[in-house]
């Protein structure tokens, strides 16, 4: 009774680009006119702490002096672990294993344990005394 055309109505799949920015997840659809002019990006690439690392990588020279050597070592080891997509790293000063921001993003929500690299602002931490201050690199 109904005529079904043989060609599919959907002739292309629109990929959503997910950006993690300041503990907020935003989705955007790439501009179709730009799609053909730019090479496709790797789907597995995550940019973690893009704005936070600017304070350490030299885009803001004044910020480098306000962190201790210990904090810089933690940030460096954490950044390397996230780039390698590792769930944990060993804290250089204490020797404890610490979850990376990458691991928290894979979980998808705050676990409530007041983690050092929580990308969700420690929203599920019940005890206010457990909440930590964010020093623009991680919670201390």
Image: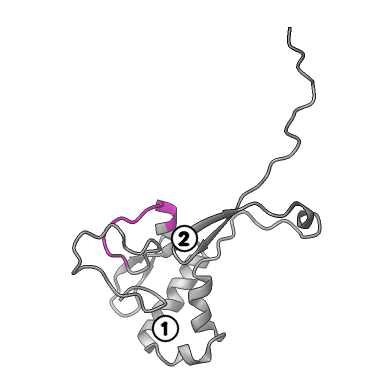
Indicate the quadrant containing the N terminus: top left, top right, bottom left or bottom right: top right
Identify which residue is drawn at 38% across, 88% down: 69
Residue 112 among those drawn in magenta: yes
Residue 111 x/y as whole percent: 30, 55
Mark in the foreground, 2 or 1: 2
Q: Where is residue 136 in the image (x, y as percent from the top left)?
A: 41, 77
Q: What stretch is highlighted in magenta?
A: 105-115
Residue in the picture at 55% in, 61% down? 46
Q: Say whether disc 2 or disc 1 marks the residue closer to the N-terminus.
A: 2
Which numbered disc covers residue 24? Answer: 2
Which numbered dot is residue 39?
Answer: none
| Number of numbered markers | 2
Q: What element carries label 2?
A: strand
The foreground one among 129 and 87 is 129
Residue 89: x and y in percent read: 39, 68
Density class for disc 2 (Cα within 10 Å; few <14, some 14-19, many ≥20) is: few
Give the residue drawn at x 41%, y 58%: 103
Name the image quarter holding residue 117: bottom left
Q: In this view, does 31 lie to the left or right of 63?
A: right
Question: Chief secondary structure of the magenta span?
Answer: loop
Q: Residue furthest front?
A: 2
Q: Position of residue 100 (x, y in %)?
A: 40, 65
Q: In this view, does 59 lie to the left or right of 99?
A: right
The secondary structure type at the circle numbered 1 is helix
Furthest toward the top, the residue is 1
Query: Disc number at residue 72?
Result: 1
On screen, residue 40 above or below 55: above
């Amino acid at each position: 009774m109904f005529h079904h055309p043989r060609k599919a109505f959907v002739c292309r799949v629109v990929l959503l680009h997910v950006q993690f920015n300041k503990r907020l997840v935003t989705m955007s659809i790439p501009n179709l006119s730009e799609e053909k002019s730019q090479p496709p990006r790797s789907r597995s690439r995550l940019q973690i702490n893009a704005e936070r690392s600017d304070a350490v990588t030299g885009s803001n020279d004044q910020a480098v002096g306000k962190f201790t050597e210990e904090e810089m070592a933690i940030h460096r080891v954490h950044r390397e672990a996230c780039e390698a997509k590792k769930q944990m790293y060993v804290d250089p000063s204490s020797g404890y294993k610490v979850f990376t921001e990458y691991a928290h993003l894979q979980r998808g929500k705050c676990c409530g344990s007041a983690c050092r690299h929580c990308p969700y602002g420690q929203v599920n931490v019940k005890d206010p005394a457990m909440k930590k201050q964010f020093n623009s690199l991680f919670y201390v």
